[in-house]
Image: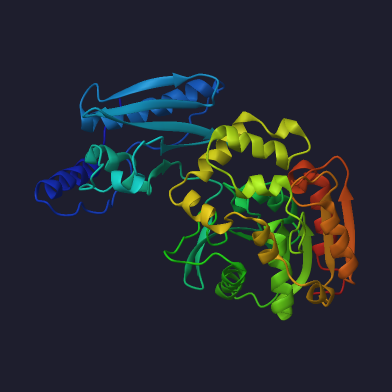
Amino acid sequence: MSRPDDATVAFMERVAAARAGGVEAPTPDVRPSVPRTLPEATDRWNSLRALAEQVIAEANAVLGAGGVELVDEHGTGRVAFALRRSGREVRVVLHHMNRTAWVELEGWGLDPDAAVEPDGPNALDDVVIVLLVKKEERVLHTDHRPELGARVNAGGIDTNYLEAGAGAPVVLVHGSGPGVSAYANWRLTIPGLAPYVRVLAPDLVGFGFTERPAGITYDMATWVSHLLGFLDALGLDRVSIVGNSFGGALAIRTAVEHPDRVDRLVLMGAAGLSFPITPGLDAVWGYEPSVQNMRALLEIFAFDQALANDELAGIRYRASVEPGVQESYASMFPAPRQRCVDALATPEDQVRAIPHETLVIHGRDDRVIPVSNATRLSQLIDRSQLHVFGRCGHWTQIERADEFNELLVDFLRPRQGQA
């Protein structure tokens, strides 16, 4: 079985020495010695188990035999194995998504931040935590996690974003569902647009894999400032914006307050006007982390209930419990949540003054943002088009991905004679 290389062993020895001397453990400067690549195999379960066994071998080289045991969870799309030390337990789970595998800590029963501090009151075995957590910011993963893209300092905020294509810049702004990220929202849209335009999809502050600065206030002023900081950091004077739900509200506010920075608008399932909060939106913003609760939200989002499956619920749930995610999310949309709807709204007289070419897209059966919002936006914005998809919920870009992409390409790509 694979064992840690000399650099890994040396690092762990420095951790032990630091702990014995009562000083802070050093920051890791080596990568895991076992490559985290998913083996080519027709049997997905065997591939996952093989990778789990590699990680177990690495952990046991530090813990000693018997420190780690494998727990099969057949049918769940994962391999779990438990680390037990001094009567305390942490479960490490191996996931599979898009032929990529990684290991993350789940189900601590302890405060995660305290658990990874060598001298923390709830610390588990320090060497194990360093081995499985600190080296890769609490996640050991393959060289490719599709939701992790480039990074840029956007107005002082370390920002994760995805980019593809070339040409006229188009910024995709995600929604506000729990576990959301640019990748989760736009994974089917980016490849559809990239042959025609330059696509940029940031994780807004408070969401996804972008920094969550301590003490930050999550409101429209913060999000508009972050979006403008993102454009400035990439040297983009003027862009088209595609906004989904909450992102649609942000696109509207940006177009009203900074019209010179916006070329064209696409508002998909957009908030941005005042309306009586729907039970669906109240449930989304009031999410409490569990796989069952996430599955229930997926059933609200999608008209096609086949999309609300256990695998997607598990992926979105795990994203919703990444370190710091739920804490920031719960602070964004506290009850009573009608005031949150109103805080995202731009006054109708200002929306009526929007001069930009605008495409409004909505699912007729949307249970989160009512289709009447789209109708009203199309009435207010003079240079607008409206497209409503029947038998479609809040996830137009997923439920009707091909048609959605065709609409966007036709609307966004430069016309003949334009730059």
Residue extending furthest bottom? 260
User: From the viewer's perspective, is residue 51 above or below residue 355?
Assistant: above
User: From the viewer's perspective, is residue 36 above or below residue 153?
Assistant: above
Residue extending furthest left? 21
Residue located at (71% from left, 56% from top):
244
- Residue 343: give x, y in percent of width and height: 66, 66
Residue extending furthest front? 336
Which of the image's four quarters has the N terminus? top left
Q: Out of 166 and 51, give the one closest to the viewer.
A: 51
- Residue 303: give x, y in percent of width and height: 78, 38
Q: Quadrant of residue 163?
A: bottom right
Relative to 330, 389 lies left or right: right
Q: Quadrant of residue 246?
A: bottom right
Q: Quadrant of residue 162?
A: bottom right
Residue located at (74% from left, 49% from top):
278
Q: Out of 201 and 360, give the one closest to the viewer.
A: 360
- Residue 259: give x, y in percent of width and height: 74, 78
Residue 239 visible in the displayed image: no
Residue 289 visible in the displayed image: yes
Q: Out of 75 and 150, give the one closest to the viewer.
A: 75
Relative to 250, 124 lies left or right: left
Which of the image's four quarters has the C terminus? bottom right
User: From the viewer's perspective, is residue 296 above or below residue 121?
Assistant: above
- Residue 190: give x, y in percent of width and height: 69, 53
